Image: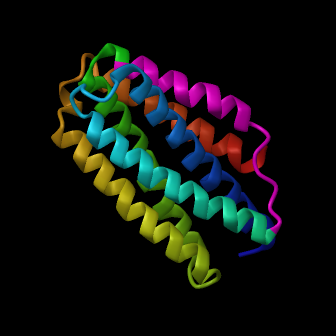
Amino acid sequence: MNRVQSERMLRVDQAGEYGATRIYAGQLAVMGDRAPHAATVRHMAEQEAGHRAKFDALIAERGVRPTILQPFWDVAGFALGAATALISPEAAMACTAAVEEEIDRHYTEQLEQLGDDDPELAALIEEFRADEREHRETALAAGAERAPGFPLLSGAIRLGCRAAIKLAERI
C-alpha cells in the first residue's frame, strides 16, 4: 500500500465518522430524549464520536489533509438525520441500518486492501467495523425495515453513502 492510498483511507474514514456524528445529531435534535430509540441513538452517537476522535488524532499524527468537503458533510449529515427522524423513529433506524451497511462494506474492502501493510490502521478499522455492524443490527431490531418506503429510503441512503465515500477519498 502506498502513501496516497493510505491517506485516502484516513481521509474518507475520518469524514465518514464525522458524517455519522452529524446524522445522529440531526436525529437527536428532532427526537429529543424521550422519543423511541433516543437512548440507543445517543449511545451510537457517542461511539461514533469516539471513532472520529481516533481518526482525527491519526490524521494529525500522519499529516494527512482532511477532506475539504467537511462543511458539506456537516450540513448534509445533520439534514439526513433530522429528515429521517421527522419521518418516523423507524425511518431514523432505517437510516442507521443503511449507512452502517455501506460502512461495513467499505471497511471490509479497506481491510482487504491493507493486508499487513498498516497494522495500526487495520486494528482501528476492525474495531470500528464491529461497532458499525452492531449499530446496523440494533437498528434492524428496532424496526428499521418497518419504516415507510424502507426499500426506497434504504437504497437512496446507501447510494448517497457510496457517492460520499468516493468524493471524500479524493477531495
The N terminus - image quarter: bottom right
Q: Position of residue 145 (x, y in %)?
A: 21, 31
Compared with residue 157, is residue 106 higher up or lower down, i.e. above or below?
Answer: below
Q: Which residue is at 63% across, 53% downward? A: 14
Q: Is residue 5 visible?
A: no
Considering every residue shown, the one lying at the far front of the view is 33
User: Mainly helix, strand or loop, the magenta region?
Assistant: helix
Compared with residue 1, is residue 20 higher up or lower down, i.e. above or below?
Answer: above
Residue 118 lies in quadrant: bottom right
Q: Which residue is at 37% across, 59% downward? A: 131
Q: Position of residue 74 (x, y in %)?
A: 63, 32
Segment colored magenta: 63-85
Magenta stretch: includes residue 129: no
Q: Is residue 164 visible?
A: yes
Q: Position of residue 48 (x, y in %)?
A: 47, 51
User: Foreground: 93 or 48?
Assistant: 48
Residue 94 lies in quadrant: top left
Magenta stretch: includes residue 72: yes
Q: Position of residue 133 (x, y in %)?
A: 33, 56
The C terminus - image quarter: top right
Q: Which residue is at 53% across, 21% downward? A: 79
In the picture provided, is 101 more to the left or to the right than 67? left
Q: Which residue is at 69% across, 44% downward? A: 168
Q: How is the image coloured?
A: rainbow
Compared with residue 133, is residue 73 higher up or lower down, i.e. above or below?
Answer: above
